Image (cartoon, grey):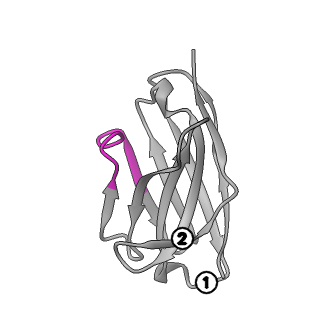
Amino acid sequence: QVQLVDSGGGLVQPGGSLRLSCAASGRTFSSLSMGWFRQAPRKERQIVAAISGRGTSANYADFVKGRFTISRDNAKNTVYLQMNSLKPEDTAVYYCAAGSNWPPSFVSWGQGTQVTVSS
């Protein structure tokens, strides 16, 4: 079983940037597909981005294309989400997730990190 620890959330003004990190342990990291989800109050959890084990494939939700970038460092067992041009509607708790296969089936989740975009 893989353990995931999310970090990097905070308060940022509209148009600003944040980088989220997720450190993984307990499994061979390069064998895992990784993803980021988010959940805003009173809304369902939605996928934001996903990346394959070797980082050769990545998918994005339409609402973040061109603004967010998912990446990974397999030597550090860490996946990142670089978020630029943030909007108030990006406010949510962001969760990293780990799974197998591609497209992935996610089975493990981080504890979440709050991102608030507000002036």
The magenta-colored residue range is 60-70
Task: Give the class, few, some or many, for how many residues have Cα within 10 Å of label 1's Cα (few <14, many ≥20).
Answer: few
Identify the image quadrant of the C terminus.
Answer: top right
Reply yes or no: does residue 106 show up in magenta: no
Mark 1 residue element: loop
Reply yes or no: does residue 61 show up in magenta: yes
Amino acid under disc 1: Arg
Residue 44 or residue 90, whichever sits in front: 44
- Tell me where residue 23 appears, x and y as whole percent: 63, 65
Q: Label 2 near label 1: C-beta < 8 Å?
A: yes
- Magenta stretch, main secondary structure, is loop
In this rendering, the answer to whether 8 lies above or below 4 is: above
- Tell me where residue 103 appears, x and y as whole percent: 34, 72
Q: Which mark is residue 98?
A: 2
Mark 2 residue element: strand
Residue at image mark 1: 27
**How many numbered marks does the figure carry?**
2
In this rendering, the answer to whether 76 lies above or below 19 is: below
Comes first in the chain, label 1 or label 2: 1
Marks 1 and 2, how far apart in space? Answer: 10 Å
Position of 72 with respect to 5 (left or right) is left
Q: Residue at x 60, y 30 (%)?
A: 116
Q: Residue at x 57, y 20 (%)?
A: 118
Amino acid under disc 2: Ala
- Tell me where residue 10 appears, x and y as whole percent: 65, 35
- Tell me where residue 11 appears, x and y as whole percent: 64, 28
Position of 65 with respect to 106 (left or right) is left
In this rendering, the answer to whether 3 lies above or below 14 is: below
